[in-house]
Amino acid sequence: MAYSRFTRVLPIALILIISVIAVAALISLARVIFFPGTSNDTAVVDTSRDALVATSVEHSVRMTVRGPIVADEAFRSYQFTITPASRQLVTYSGYLDSEVAKISLDNNVQAYDEFVHALDKANLAKGEAFSGDKNDLRGICATGQVTNFEIIDGEDIVKSLWTSTCNGSKGSLDANVEQLSQLFVNQIPDAQKTIKSIER
């Protein structure tokens, strides 16, 4: 009698288990089809904008510009580094970065806050950074100018975006390079004159 009851309950239990599994599978499938971007496993969070507008002491932004690939004696580059506490422009000669001139000035949090928000409004953090060989700037735009922007948190480069004046090497920057460059130049009085002094 007990065996007879067991044989009657077993198919019902199996049907219930299969039904529960089928419903769970349908729900999962519906989530994938109708809400593809909500999976925690595939979500990639870009924190570069937060790092850009942060004003704590360890944050900074940097712009590096290098000229055409020429003889070591004629190669020129320059770099702006702006932090909540300081502003700096350094010009270089040669591939070993022999310092030609340096301007170092103090900064304050309020001024830095306005500056990084201006960079944000100009879409500095908008581009998708390259990786691997695509982000190797050696030899890029050999006859023109390469401009690289970096958002920095302590020792870490949160995002690095670059562009060039050569048509075949647009780079990863998805913003107006002239607008961004001018914002950096405007941070240091006489920056334009200092830059022109190394140009030939």
Image (cartoon, rainbow, N blue to C red):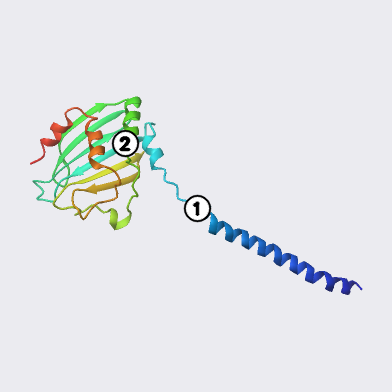
**Circle 1 sits in a helix, a strand or a loop, which is it?**
helix
Q: Residue furthest front?
A: 34
* Residue at image mark 2: 119
Quick check: 7 above or below 142?
below
Please state which amino acid type lies under the numbered disc 1.
Answer: Gly
* Residue at image mark 1: 37
**Could you say which is closer to the camera, residue 32 or residue 150?**
32
Q: Residue at x 65, y 60 (%)?
A: 24
Q: Residue at x 66, y 65 (%)?
A: 22
Q: Residue at x 16, y 28 (%)?
A: 190
User: At which x and y percent is residue 147?
Assistant: 22, 44
Quarter of the rendering occupied by the C terminus: top left
The alpha-carbon separation of the residues under discs 1 and 2 comes to 29 Å
Mark 1 or mark 2: which comes first in sequence? 1
**Could you say which is closer to the camera, residue 92 or residue 25?**
25
**Circle 2 sits in a helix, a strand or a loop, which is it?**
helix
All told, the count of numbered labels is 2
Q: Residue furthest right?
A: 1
**Could you say which is closer to the camera, residue 181 or residue 98?**
181
What numbered label is drawn on residue 86? none
Quarter of the rendering occupied by the N terminus: bottom right
User: At which x and y percent is residue 123?
Assistant: 33, 40
Q: Using a 10 Å C-alpha cutoff, classify the residue at mark 1 as few (fewer than 14 neighbours), some (14 to 19) or many (20 or more).
A: few
The answer to which image quadrant residue 105 occupies is: top left
Q: Using a 10 Å C-alpha cutoff, classify the residue at mark 2 as few (fewer than 14 neighbours), some (14 to 19) or many (20 or more).
A: many
Please state which amino acid type lies under the numbered disc 2.
Answer: Leu
Quick check: 105 above or below 141?
above
The answer to which image quadrant residue 16 occupies is: bottom right
Quick check: 55 above or below 199?
above
User: At which x and y percent is residue 177?
Assistant: 24, 42
In the visual, does 2 lie left or right of 192? Answer: right
In the visual, does 93 lie left or right of 109? Answer: left
